Image (cartoon, grey):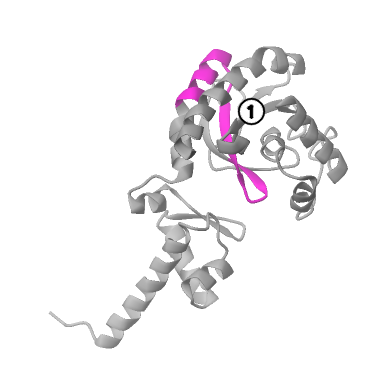
């Protein structure tokens, strides 16, 4: 058996050390770019990029644009579920219950930088799908979940977030200016829910309500999407809102107890 040369061992251990440093950094930062990972590991961008792309290939990370995010395989390395995993575990039975009552797909989303990230979904059986998959992102400005998730933020913070990327109306009904979107977010804060009526896509209506943690902080949004031919705006408010609000309250109680 041929012994490994000391130089090879040193290089291998150095690569492992860099990878472990990046993995450790993901326990602090939920999202990192190549530059972020290089700083965290104290290495070059080229070395950090190689480590990150290797972890993408091995299904430890996902790459979205310039951002790398942990997948379940990486979060399981520590043997302890992350806050996001715990939230999904708490919420899933309740969103499935709401799905069964409404016969509409119900989802759970959280704020992920400047986007709404879907982390759980109970799918209803319809010929035409109206929702997004788990792991998908939506812009904050034109989604019901985004408007709910921002509804406790200050006007200054909202305007800053919205100004980072161009806002483009996806349909003729869409809002695309900061004052208009800010007004919709403030309306959601006042009413306790947000509705987007064919703003994301023609033929789709969505509604979202907040899930509260300790100190009244919004930790997630529960949402429902439906075909506009099947569900009118008045139906959203009268028939779906009570069920969705009850679902959010059922999730909020254990979340407050867990995080309190």
- Please give the name of the residue rendered at 70% of the width and 39% of the height, measured from the top-left corner: 152
Look at the image and say whether residue 97 sits in the magenta stretch. yes
* Residue that label 1 marks: 130
Determine which quarter of the picture holds residue 89. top left
- Please give the name of the residue rendered at 61% of the width and 21% of the height, measured from the top-left corner: 245
Tell me which segment is drawn in magenta: 93-117
Determine which quarter of the picture holds residue 7. bottom left
As rendered, which of 24 and 189 lies closer to the eye? 189
Residue 61, visible in the rendered structure: yes
As rendered, which of 176 and 2 lies closer to the eye? 176
Query: What SS does tag 1 mark?
Result: loop
Whether residue 12 is situated above or below residue 20 in the rendered picture: below
Determine which quarter of the picture holds residue 197. top right
In the picture, the quarter occupied by the N terminus is bottom left
Residue 177, visible in the rendered structure: no
Where residue 134 appears, x then y in whole percent? Answer: 53, 38
As rendered, which of 126 and 4 lies closer to the eye? 4
Whether residue 186 is situated above or below residue 192 in the rendered picture: below
Where residue 228 appears, x then y in whole percent? Answer: 73, 21
Where residue 82 appears, x then y in whole percent? Answer: 43, 46
- Please give the name of the residue rendered at 59% of the width and 37% of the height, measured from the top-left corner: 215
């Amino acid at each position: 058996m041929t012994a490994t040369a000391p130089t090879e061992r040193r290089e291998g251990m150095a690569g492992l050390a860099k990878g472990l440093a990046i993995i450790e950094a993901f326990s602090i930062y939920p999202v990192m770019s190549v530059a972020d990972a290089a700083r965290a590991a104290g290495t070059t961008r080229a070395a950090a990029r190689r480590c990150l792309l290797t972890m993408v290939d091995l299904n430890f990370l996902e790459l979205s644009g310039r951002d790398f995010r942990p997948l379940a395989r990486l979060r399981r390395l520590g043997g302890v579920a992350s806050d996001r995993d715990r939230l999904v575990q708490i919420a899933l039975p309740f969103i499935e219950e709401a799905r069964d009552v409404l016969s509409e797909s119900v989802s759970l989303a959280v704020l992920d930088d400047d986007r709404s990230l879907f982390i759980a979904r109970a799918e209803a059986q319809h010929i035409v799908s109206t929702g997004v998959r788990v792991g998908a992102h939506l812009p904050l400005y034109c989604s019901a979940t985004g408007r709910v998730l921002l509804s406790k933020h200050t006007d200054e913070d909202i305007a800053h977030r919205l100004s980072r990327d161009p806002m483009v109306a996806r349909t003729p009904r869409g809002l695309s200016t900061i004052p208009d979107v800010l007004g919709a977010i403030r309306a959601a804060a006042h009413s306790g829910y947000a509705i987007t009526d064919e703003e994301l896509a023609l033929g789709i209506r969505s509604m979202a309500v907040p899930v509260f943690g300790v100190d009244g902080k919004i930790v997630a949004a529960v949402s429902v999407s439906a075909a506009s031919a099947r569900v009118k705006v008045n139906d959203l408010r009268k028939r779906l809102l009570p069920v969705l609000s009850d679902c959010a309250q059922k999730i909020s109680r254990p979340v407050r107890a867990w995080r309190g």
